[in-house]
Amino acid sequence: MTHQEIDQLVKSWIVDAATRPANPRVQQVVLRLVGDLCKAMEDLDIQPSEFWAGLEFLTKAGKANELGLLTPGLGLERFMDIRADEAEARAGLAGGTPRTIEGPLYVAGAPEAIGFARLDDGTESAQGELVFMQGTVYDADGQPLPRAKVEVWHANLLGNYSFFDPTQSNFNLRRTIYTDLDGRYGFQTIMPKGYGCPPGGSTATLLDLLGRHGQRPAHIHFFVSAEGQRKLTTQINIDGDEYLWDDFAFASREGLVPPVVRVSDPAALAAKGVDGPFASIDFDFHLHREIAAAPSADVERLRAAA
Ligand code: MBD
Ligand code: FE
């Protein structure tokens, strides 16, 4: 069949078959996606057994709650970031801390603190590297933002996230920190390890067929929000990780790899009240002011809430 014939046929199913007013946006999107799929089936001569294998793959991925993992793995979450960056540039917004993907592992409702929090529950203190991370949240004019909301979450030493990993305590390595009156936030935690897609899962199986790995470099996630500012979704990567520029989720970006400073000077340890060396990471967040000309940066999606 020609693409034109396919378009006509798909329109007859999706549009002409309607007997009641349709939701126009849903109709538009479904018409396009079904048409594009039929064209791919025709062009690639996709056989029925292949079609059903694909459907069964998605069914299994959905049942295992892996569609939110497949999305970054196929680059689609990165693609939405690229489009958001382009929309902001068209609206005249430039500079600011780069965004990068949320990923599937945020949990709402983390314990709140003002200024400073400890993220880890101490269970991995003996094996993990102690980390202090701190900085200031600024608006587009370079003014510090008091009481900005900094939501932070990261993996443990096994690359696993609390809630999704039921062996961890509630909200381990997750906090909501409001900046102090100088716009500063800070936290103590343990150095995360990189994440790997669950072995044997749908995402890992597909990546294997594509000749790809399913590893992420060690990273720390953030949502940063404040009154009148566009919500920032971002991450920092831990410098030196072997996957730093080889992330299966394509989320590494210039500007999101702050230096990690190793501190062992006795006076500096004493000032922190710790008895061993630690890693220190300074990182400031620069937000954009909210403007109507750019699509909302506050992305709606179903998120876990513990
Ligand atoms: C993660 O920790 C993550 O951040 C992403 C994007 C995908 C899988 C695991
Ligand atoms: Fe992550």
Image (spheres, rainbow, N blue to C red):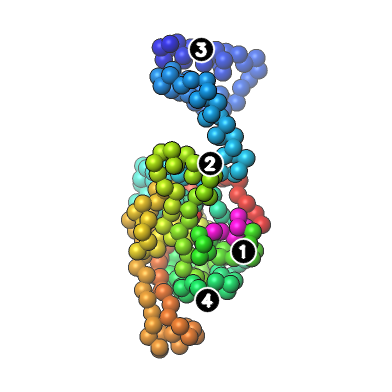
In front: label 2 or label 3: 2
Residue 126 x/y as whole percent = 52, 76
1 and 134: which is toward the camera: 1
Above or below, comparing residue 222 to residue 291 in the picture: below
User: Distance from label 4 to label 3 (Cα)?
Assistant: 64 Å
Q: Secondary structure at mark 1?
A: loop
- Three-letter amino acid code of the residue under disc 2: Ser
64 and 2: which is toward the camera: 64
Q: Earlier in the sequence, mark 4 or mark 3?
A: 3
Residue 277 showing in the rendered view: yes
Q: Which residue is mark 1?
A: 168
Crowd rating for badge 4 (residues with CA inside 10 Å; few <14, some 14–19, many 20+): few
User: Distance from label 4 to label 1 (Cα)?
Assistant: 16 Å
Q: Is residue 60 left or right of residue 46?
A: right
Q: Earlier in the sequence, mark 2 or mark 1?
A: 1
Q: Is residue 107 magenta?
A: no
Q: Is residue 268 left or right of residue 168?
A: left
Q: Secondary structure at mark 2?
A: helix
**Which dot marks residue 9?**
3
21 and 271: which is toward the camera: 271
Residue span colored magenta: 160-165
Crowd rating for badge 3 (residues with CA inside 10 Å; few <14, some 14–19, many 20+): some
Q: Quadrant of the N terminus?
A: top left
Q: Secondary structure at mark 3?
A: helix
Q: Answer yes or no: do the residues labelled 2 and 4 have beta carbons within 8 Å?
A: no
Q: Earlier in the sequence, mark 3 or mark 1?
A: 3
Q: Magenta-highlighted stretch: main secondary structure?
A: loop
Q: Answer yes or no: do the residues labelled 4 and 1 have beta carbons within 8 Å?
A: no
**Which dot marks residue 202?**
2
Q: Which residue is mark 4?
A: 126
